[in-house]
Image (spheres, grey):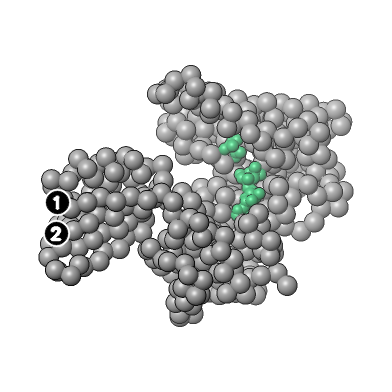
Amino acid sequence: MPRLVMKFGGTSVATVERIRNVARHVKREVEAGIEVAVVVSAMAGKTNELVAWCKEASGLFDPREYDVVVASGEQVTSGLLAIVLQEMGLPARSWQGWQIPIHTSDAHGAARIAEIDGSAMLKAIAGRREVAVVSGFQGVHKESGRVTTLGRGGSDTSAVALAAAIQADRCDIYTDVDGVYTTDPRIVSKARRLARIAFEEMLEMASLGAKVLQVRSVELAMLHQVPTYVRSSFDDPADPRQGTLICGEEDIVEQQVVTGIAYSKDEAQITLREVADKPGVAAAIFMPLADANINVDMIIQVVSDDSTTTDITFTVPAAEFERAQRILEDQRPAIGYAALQGATDVVKVSAIGVGMRSHAGVAARAFRALAEKGINIRAITTSEIKFSVLIDAAYTELAVRTLHSLYGLDRA
Ligand code: ADP
Ligand code: ASP
Ligand code: MG
């Protein structure tokens, strides 16, 4: 019997009426003879509200209690969807993370799934032919028995991990757009829906800012080779449209050089001026940041005129900007620099495509096109299937649109 995991995001379950529409999608699959497990997010805006309540309750809250609070949003929608399915005459039962169980690490607020025992749930969906409605985003730490959550956007990861655990034939991610686009369709109206995208490209797109899927969910889909299909919950349940299949590179026939453009405002730039140009300095800067678990991304070093000092520029996640600055100020005597400058009004714009492996000069064309628009590039990184530029945030849309047209991605 074919088996399917269907995941519905926050906007898709934002009201009871929308939950009824979700139930119609589920009913279609069940009536086609498919064994179905559904994963739901909290209603749109709910998780933000719960997070804000924790912050209001205490500036320094216990992360274990934060998880108890924020996991509750998904409990509500799983129960509501089960009720609506039952009302439509479909046997259905809700499952919380601990009931399955979905075992995770104890990194509260950003836990990683360690193991899923899908056997009890399989008995329900395959044996009793009952739809399992699973709360996304949450799990349980086996040793302490405490509720955990998987980080923002984590329901995608719940769905893919569950699909791998119960050997589902596919994982359908229903959201508020009808697939993965060449760039965020909310900022470029000429963005095109991709019929297919390779796991590796999707992983880069998500890592570089395309929030349509949580990064970890794509890693798991790639690792376990789960065919993952992104589609719209706003389609007519009786006649749904096509979405985007995330699949192996070998399953893609028409390969472009650049598949998509992503942007991330989640970056901050730090420049250390007049650092001594001698061995060991880079280690003195980056080791303390690494020890504090701060991810450094782009790095550029410029030798200054006097050749005894150099300027070093690098980026850190915006959320870590202040912590990084504090560490570098503490380390100033050991590093030795004249000044520390920081900027948060920056954005990283990236182009992604497996075709870059076999084409030279792809990034160089972008540098020229951005220069022609008067956009100054602060830093650059490249790797096998992507390149990124750091620019002023004010130019985000112009830069994304420029690269989107440059690589022939605009819809006709
Ligand atoms: P959900 O609540 O269903 O999980 P999300 O808001 O997390 O939905 O993800 C869907 C959103 O991702 C879309 O509304 C869109 O604005 C955004 N997005 C960003 N980049 C892309 C892209 N390349 N393709 C499709 N959507 C994208
Ligand atoms: N509700 C959670 C969030 O808003 C998880 C998710 O929607 O995927 O982050
Ligand atoms: Mg999401």
- The image position of residue 332, as x and y in percent, is 17, 46
Image point (86%, 52%), residue name: 239
Could you classify mark 1 by the number of other residues whose Cα lies within 10 Å: few (under 14), some (14-19), or many (20 or more)? some
Q: Which mark is residue 336?
A: 1
Image point (45%, 64%), residue name: 388
- The image position of residue 7, as x and y in percent, is 68, 43
Q: Which residue is mark 2?
A: 276
| Observer-nearest of 395 and 296 | 395
Discs 2, 1 touching: Cβ within 8 Å = yes
Image point (66%, 36%), residue name: 44
| Observer-nearest of 352 and 120 | 352
| Observer-nearest of 226 and 354 | 354
Q: Which mark is residue 177?
A: none
Residue at the farthest top position: 57
Name the element at disc 2.
strand
Image point (45%, 31%), residue name: 108
Horizontal side of residue 60 vs 6, given as left or right: left
- The image position of residue 152, as x and y in percent, is 53, 39
Horizontal side of residue 11 vs 89, given as left or right: left
Of the image marks 2 and 1, the number of the one nearer the N terminus = 2
Which amino acid type is shown beneath numbered disc 2? Ala
Whereabouts is ligand 2, in terms of quadrant?
A: top right
